[in-house]
Image: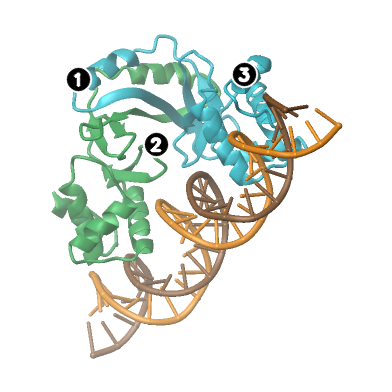
Chain colours: A green, B cyan, C brown, D orange
DNA sequence: ATTATATTGCAACGTGGTTGCATTTGTCAA
DNA sequence: TTGACAAATGCAACCACGTTGCAATATAAT
C-alpha cells in the first residue's frame, strides 16, 4: 500500500525523503481519526524523526495537492488531514477534548440536497457534515 | 425586537452599553450571513463606535452565553456568529472569498441520522452542515 | 563523484484570539 | 444629584496556528 503511493510520487519526480515516507506510514496506520499538523509533528518526534514545523505544514499541503490526503474541517479551528480513501463519510467531534472520529452514514441523502442547493448562485463542489457532542470520556 | 433582548439583559443585571446595544442592532439588521469578530469590529468602526478588539471578542462570547447569538462553524478557521433565530438551517461557503450564506434545506433528515449516530459512544448535541463551492462572483 | 533541484530549517512575520490589570462607565440607592 | 459598587472597557502583552523568504542540505540521476 505504502509502496504504491511512494512509487507514484517518485514517478512524478518527487523525492522520497525520510519525513515524507514516515508521514505516509503514519497516515496509513492511522485509520481512526483525522490528525492536525501539531499532532503529526508530535508523532514524528515520537518516531525519532523530528521535523521542523514548516516542513510538516508544507508536507501536508504537498500530500493534499497530490490527492494522497484530504483536508477535514473538524470545526475546531485547526486543519486536520486524513488518508484519501474512497468511501463517503462524516465526522463526530468532541466539544471538550476535540477528539475526532469518522462516521459512516448508511444512506447519505446529502448528494440530493446538494443538487437542490447547487441550482442557486453558488456552484457547490462539496460538503462537510460534522456531529458535535461529548465523547465517552468527557461525558 | 431589540427592546425585548435589551430588557431581558437588563433584567438579568447586565448593563446596556453603547457597544452592546449597537452590536445587537447590527445582528438584527444582518439576517443574511454570519459575521466574524473582525467584520463586526469593522462595522462598529463604520458606525462611529470604535471598540477595542478585546471588547468585541468578549461581547461575542457574552452574547453567545446569553443565547442571543450562536456560533456558526464556517470551516474557514474563523468563528462566525449569527442571531439565534429559531429555524434549522445550514450554510454555503465560498472557497475563494469566504462569503457565507444561509441555506434552508426543506426536509432536513439529519435529525434521524443524528439519533442513529447518538447510540454510539459519543453523546451528540448538535451538527453542522456546510456546503462548499464558489459564489457567483468567484466562479 | 558531480550536479541540478527538491526539500529542509531557521527566523521572522501574520492573523485570530486570549489574559491580567488598571481605568472607565452604567446603574441603583440614598 | 451624588456616590459607590460592579460590570464593562482599553491596553499591552501574550498564545496558537499557520505562512514566507532565503540560505543550507539532501535525493537521485548522470
Q: In which quarter of the image is the C terminus of chain A?
A: top left
Q: From where the camera sits, is residue B11 visible?
A: yes
First in sequence, mark 3 or 1: give its number. Answer: 3
Q: Nearer the viewer, mark 1 or mark 2?
A: 1
Q: Is mark 1 on a helix, strand or loop?
A: loop
Q: How far apart are marks 1 and 2 (CA)?
A: 22 Å
Task: Name the image quarter holding residue C30.
Answer: top right
- Are tags 3 and 1 found on a single chain? yes
Between A63 and B63, the one nearer to me in the picture: B63
Query: Residue A48: x percent and y percent?
Result: 18, 66
Say which residue label 1 marks. B119
Query: Residue B104: x percent and y percent?
Result: 48, 15
Query: Residue A9: x percent and y percent?
Result: 25, 56
Q: What element carries label 3?
A: helix
The residue depicted at 23 percent of the width and 63 percent of the height is A45
Judge from the rendering whether residue B8 lies leftward or rightward of residue D17; answer left or right: right
Say which residue label 2 marks. A75
Q: In this view, does A59 lie above or below B73?
A: below
Say which residue label 3 marks. B5
The residue depicted at 36 percent of the width and 16 percent of the height is A112
Chain ID for label 3?
B
The residue depicted at 21 percent of the width and 35 percent of the height is A137
- Mark 1 touches mark 2? (CB < 8 Å): no
Amino acid at each position: 500500500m505504502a509502496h504504491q503511493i511512494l512509487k507514484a510520487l517518485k514517478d512524478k519526480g518527487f523525492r522520497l525523503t525520510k519525513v515524507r515516507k514516515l508521514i505516509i506510514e503514519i497516515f496509513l496506520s492511522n485509520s481512526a481519526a483525522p490528525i492536525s499538523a501539531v499532532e503529526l509533528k508530535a508523532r514524528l518526534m515520537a518516531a525519532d524523526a523530528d521535523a521542523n514545523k514548516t516542513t510538516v505544514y508544507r508536507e501536508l499541503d504537498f500530500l493534499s495537492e497530490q490527492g494522497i490526503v484530504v483536508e477535514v474541517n473538524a470545526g475546531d479551528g485547526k486543519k486536520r488531514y486524513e488518508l484519501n480513501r474512497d468511501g463517503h463519510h462524516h465526522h463526530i467531534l468532541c466539544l471538550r477534548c476535540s477528539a475526532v472520529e469518522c462516521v459512516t452514514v448508511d444512506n447519505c441523502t446529502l448528494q440530493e440536497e446538494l443538487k437542490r442547493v447547487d441550482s442557486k448562485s453558488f456552484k457547490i463542489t462539496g460538503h462537510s457534515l460534522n456531529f458535535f457532542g461529548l465523547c465517552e470520556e468527557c461525558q
